[in-house]
Amino acid sequence: MTLAHYLTVSALLFLIGIFGALTRRNIIGVLMSIELMFNAANLNLAAFDRFLHPEGAVGQTIAIFTMTVAAAEIVVGLALLLAIYRNTDTTYVEDFNLLKG
Amino acid sequence: MIEHIAFYSLSALVLLSALAVVLHRNTVHSSLFLGLSLAGVAGLFALLGADFLFAGQIMVYVSGIAVLVMFVVMLLGRASDLHLRQVNEFWMAALLICAIASAGLLKIARSYSGTLAAAAAAPSTRTIGKLFLGDYLLPFELVSLILLAALLGAVFFTHRELPEAAK
């Protein structure tokens, strides 16, 4: 297995995440796609750590920071989503137009 | 040989279930596939020799975030969602963006096609712990503050004001 294999998988995962974040109408789907993109970045960090700098494990440490921030992000995102749903009664992003003039 | 089989099957699992997350009409199924995809990424971490990341991925993502997303899906879902389109009308433009980005990303990936791992993977939990309390002490403490802020923010945003009559 070379580094290119892992980079290809994570690139494809990232692209799937981008496609989902751009096209899903449901905001929960958008949040799930963003999680896929975070995972692609983590996979990249772990692969570079393994193949290019195996001695320090710095890449894995940064991947754990990413994981923590992603957990905080999804918690706040879902809490905001609940608050928005309570006000607008919908989860579809094109209906979130309260600020439109 | 076993590594090849494990890598290709895990990659297929990750990518196919990620596609199902993005394309599936039913959001409940989508969130289940999200858990499967994240578990596949955990398997790839194990294949890379990142033991602590593997455990963290299982604990934080598969059993934390995926379950949380599933809760919210079931809280907010409606039966009428199953008959609505889940993909908006810009999917052609999104596909074009992905095609252009994939050209660049895969070109970068191809430039590393000769890079092999230098040595067998060693357990890294001890090294990560030393880095957390050594070089990365400040980010480590900041991340704990971020988690506290996220906790308080979640409570704050979901808090419902009781009407005056109910008090």
Image (cartoon, grey):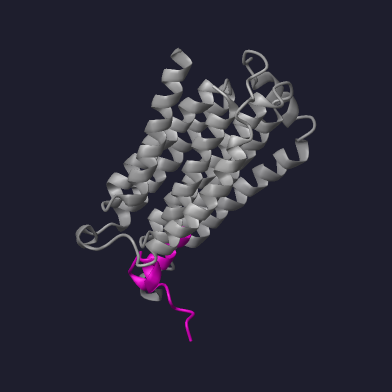
Q: Nearer the viewer, residue B118 or A43?
A: B118
Residue A7 found in image quarter: top right
Residue B29 screen position, x and y as percent: 28, 45
Residue drawn 37% across the image and 32% down it: B13
Find the magenta span and give its range: A79-101
Please say if A17 is above or below A42.
below
Residue drawn 54% across the image and 48% down it: B103
The answer to whether residue A95 is magenta is yes
Please say if A35 is above or below B96.
above
Residue drawn 67% across the image and 32% down it: A59
Residue drawn 65% across the image and 42% down it: B144
Residue B158 screen position, x and y as percent: 45, 60
Residue B127 screen position, x and y as percent: 71, 21
Q: Residue furthest bottom?
A: A101
B139 on left or right of B6:
right
Q: Nearer the viewer, residue B78 or B46?
A: B46
B130 on left or right of A39:
right
